[in-house]
Amino acid sequence: MSVVRMRSGRLTPGGNARAGVTRTVVGLLAIAFGSLGLATLASAEGEAASSARGEQLFALCTQCHGTAGEGNRDALAPAIAGLPAWYLEAQLNKFRAGIRGLHAEDTGGLRMYPMSQWLRTDEDAKAVAGYVASLPATNPAPALEAHGDAGRGAGYYAVCSACHMPNGSGNQGMGAPPLVGMNDWYLLESIRKYKASIRGSNPRDNLGQAMIGMVATLPSDEAILDVIAHIQSLDK
């Protein structure tokens, strides 16, 4: 190896050695960035495959929820387009596991349970949830004939806001979905089901059991309509 004597008297590698080190470093960097590129490409391909799988699986859902995920009240199917993927996935997995949808009085749930069994794996549930979340929100129009008082509802909603947030945007950390943008008829039906323990009573449904306790603060149908009116006003 050639050496160059510095003024300090110490020996340092010569030009050939330095060139060799440089080539080694450049080679390692090329390998590192090449691996990163391959990983990024693989990730993108995986996401594309998941999206395609989700779209394929969603074809089954359109029978009730509509091709745009806009929902269909006659089929007891709420609007689902644009809801957070984490929430959709959690609910699908509850249906798949029989935690939700098997109560004898839960007509809508009893329809969803057999449909959820078409999702064979957790990856299927994740794929269709991701696809539905990617659809533009449909912002359904009010459908209830009876209307509550949003002003009175604001007082009741103070309890809900602890999890669902003051603006109704939801909180993933609390497992609380957004309420704004949901069908008013679906909110009414869901709250009634929680009050009657038709939904949320399964011992494995911790969040559902918490909801049963929360809706106990709504003493009547009038109060339920009031809080729904307030939720609807949050999106204005």
Image: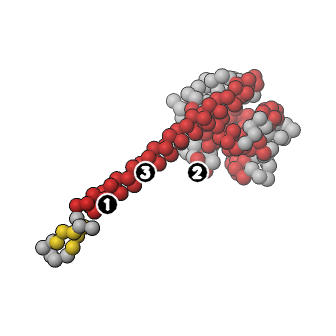
Question: Residue visible at 57% across and 43% down?
Answer: 170
Question: Residue visible at 50% across and 45% down?
Answer: 39
Question: Residue visible at 47% across and 48% down?
Answer: 35
Front disc: 2 or 3: 3
Q: Nearer the viewer, residue 98 or 121?
A: 121
Tell me which label, 2 or 1, sits earlier in the chain: 1
Q: In the rendering, at what x and y percent does residue 189 appear?
A: 73, 34
Front disc: 1 or 3: 1
Q: From this view, report whether residue 216 is shown above or below residue 109.
A: below
Real-space Cα separation, disc 2 to disc 1, in angstroms:
49 Å
Residue at the disc numbered 3: 31
Q: Which image quarter is the N terminus in?
A: bottom left
Q: Residues within 10 Å of mark 2 (few under 14, many from 20)?
A: few
Q: Residues within 10 Å of mark 1 (few under 14, many from 20)?
A: few
Q: Give the amino acid type for the residue marked by disc 3 in the picture.
A: Ile
Can I make out residue 190 in this image?
yes
Which color scheme is applied?
A: secondary structure
Q: Give the amino acid type for the residue marked by disc 2 in the picture.
A: Gly
Q: Is residue 7 left or right of residue 147?
A: left
**What is the secondary structure assignment of the residue under circle 1?**
helix
**What is the secondary structure assignment of the residue under circle 3?**
helix
Question: Residue visible at 80% across and 49% down?
Answer: 202
Q: In the rendering, at what x and y percent does residue 87 appear?
A: 64, 42
Residue 28, quarter of picture: bottom left
Front disc: 2 or 1: 1
Residue 103, quarter of picture: top right
Real-space Cα separation, disc 1 to disc 3, in angstroms:
15 Å
Residue at the disc numbered 2: 173
Residue 127, quarter of picture: top right
Mark on residue 21?
Answer: 1
Can I make out residue 150 in this image?
no
Q: Residue furthest bottom?
A: 9
